[in-house]
């Protein structure tokens, strides 16, 4: 849940109005409708038709600025 909070804060700081929700990979199929971006800390092999960014940096801190930049580029 902490990752979702960090993403919400990033979007708010950059004036991006978005609905952020956290779910398990197994739930993606039922939640992907209307989704613009998937940020995941798990491996996602299926193509959901939207960009996928690996968000492990929100946990480890390694490469966090790069990950934030990728998220903003997709959503702006």
Image (cartoon, helix red, strand yellow):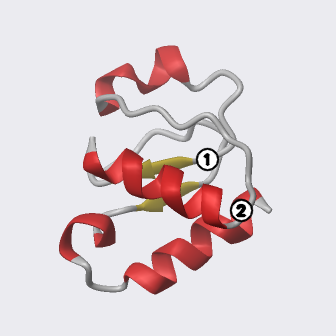
Pointers 2 and 1 in contact (C-beta within 8 Å): yes
Residue at 73 percent across and 54 percent down: it is: 16
Tell me the quarter of the picture where residue 61 sits.
bottom left
Measuring from the top left, give residue 48's x and y in whole percent.
Answer: 58, 36
Q: Quadrant of the N terminus?
A: top left
In the current view of this chain or complex, which residue is farthest to the left?
Answer: 60
Of residues 31 and 68, which is closer to you in this image? 68
Position of residue 51 relative to residue 64, above or below, is above
* Nearer to the camera, 61 or 42: 61
Image disc number at residue 67? none
Q: Which residue is mark 2?
A: 74
Percent x, y for residue 39?
46, 52
Q: Residues within 10 Å of mark 2 (few under 14, many from 20)?
A: few
Q: Is residue 37 above or below residue 28?
A: below
Quadrant holding the C terminus:
bottom right
Q: To which residue does mark 1 refer?
A: 37
Residue ID at (58%, 26%): 32
Front residue of 45/15: it is 15
Q: CA distance from mark 2 to mark 1?
A: 7 Å
Is 58 on the left-hand or right-hand side of 45? left
Q: Secondary structure at mark 1?
A: loop
- Determine whether the residue tagged by mark 2 lies in a helix, strand or loop: helix
Name which residue lies at 68% across and 41% down. 18
Which one is earlier in the sequence, the residue at label 2 or at label 1? Answer: 1
Query: In the displayed structure, would residue 30 be above or below residue 2?
Result: above
Indicate left or right for 4 with 49 as reference: left
From the viewer's side, name the closer residue of 8 and 60: 8
């Amino acid at each position: 849940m902490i990752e979702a909070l960090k993403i919400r804060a990033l979007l708010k700081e950059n004036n991006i109005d978005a609905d952020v929700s956290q779910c398990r990979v197994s739930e993606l199929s039922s939640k992907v409708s209307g989704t613009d971006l998937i940020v995941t800390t798990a491996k996602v092999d299926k193509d959901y038709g939207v960009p996928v960014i690996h968000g492990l940096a929100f946990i480890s801190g390694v490469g966090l600025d790069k990950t934030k930049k990728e998220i903003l580029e997709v959503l702006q």
